[in-house]
Image: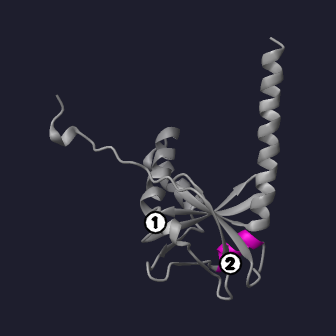
Amino acid sequence: MPTELEIEPKRIEPRFTGAYDVTLDSQGRVIVPSPCLSQGLVDSIHIVPRRFDRYKYLGLFPSEGFTKYFQDYADREGLTEEEFVELSVFLFNDVARQKLNASKPRITLTEPLIQHLFNGEADQGEVLTLVGAGILFVLWRKTEYEDWQENRKQKIEERFLQQKVGNTSQ
């Protein structure tokens, strides 16, 4: 029987959901909607520039989720501590860490983040979409998000249609 020290408490991962349109102000700030705060996007976050195919977006990880996400990746890949440090330096050079103030929950997009998301300068009043994606939130340009959704929808429909056709021919 395990001793008290050998028992690890199970933790429930936050599961962020929903999509919220937000507006970029003239100082590069976005106000975080209250439902995001109530789901756990509070205190300190890491903002990570990311890509999926041709789409660029920002991953917003709560600090605890950020550490766990990348440690789990390192464990899955069997990285040594040295390899993990090298990968971290390479991947997270542009990561921005910010504190959220509960009374004025704003994210400030730094110049490298704006460069990544907008390929240059952002327009004041630009509409962005903040999407819950499991252990993180994802910040997209609204037009990119809508295009990505349509593209993913088509790919999913094609895949299920192929599976359905494959199953009926057997």
Foreground residue among 73 and 87? 73
What is the CA distance from the residue labelled 2 to the residue labelled 1?
20 Å
94 horizontally vs 45: left or right: right
Secondary element type, mark 1: helix
Secondary element type, mark 2: strand
Which of label 2 and label 1 is nearer to you?
1
Foreground residue among 92 and 123? 123
Hey, what amino acid is under mark 2? Answer: Thr
121 horizontally vs 134: left or right: right
> Which residue is the site of mark 2?
23
Per the picture, the main secondary structure of the magenta-coloured stretch is helix
Image point 79% across, 66% down: which residue? 143
Total numbered circles: 2
Residue 103, x across and y down, in percent? 44, 82
Image point 80% across, 38% down: which residue? 157
Figure quadrant of the C terminus? top right
Hey, what amino acid is under mark 1? Answer: Ser
Viewer can see residue 29: yes
> Which residue is the site of mark 1?
38
Instruction: State if disc 1 and disc 2 touch (CB < 8 Å).
Output: no
Does the magenta-highlighted stretch encompass residue 156? no
Quarter-wise, where is residue 58 in the image? Answer: bottom right
Figure quadrant of the N terminus? top left
Residue 77, x across and y down, in percent? 53, 40
The correct choice, above or below, for 169 with respect to 24 in the image is: above
Quarter-wise, where is residue 144 in the image? Answer: bottom right
The range drawn in magenta is 111-118
Q: Earlier in the sequence, mark 2 or mark 1?
A: 2
Foreground residue among 62 and 150? 150
Image point 45% across, 54% down: which residue? 14
> Badge 2, how many Cα within 10 Å: few under 14, some, many 20+?
some
Residue 128, x across and y down, in percent? 70, 71
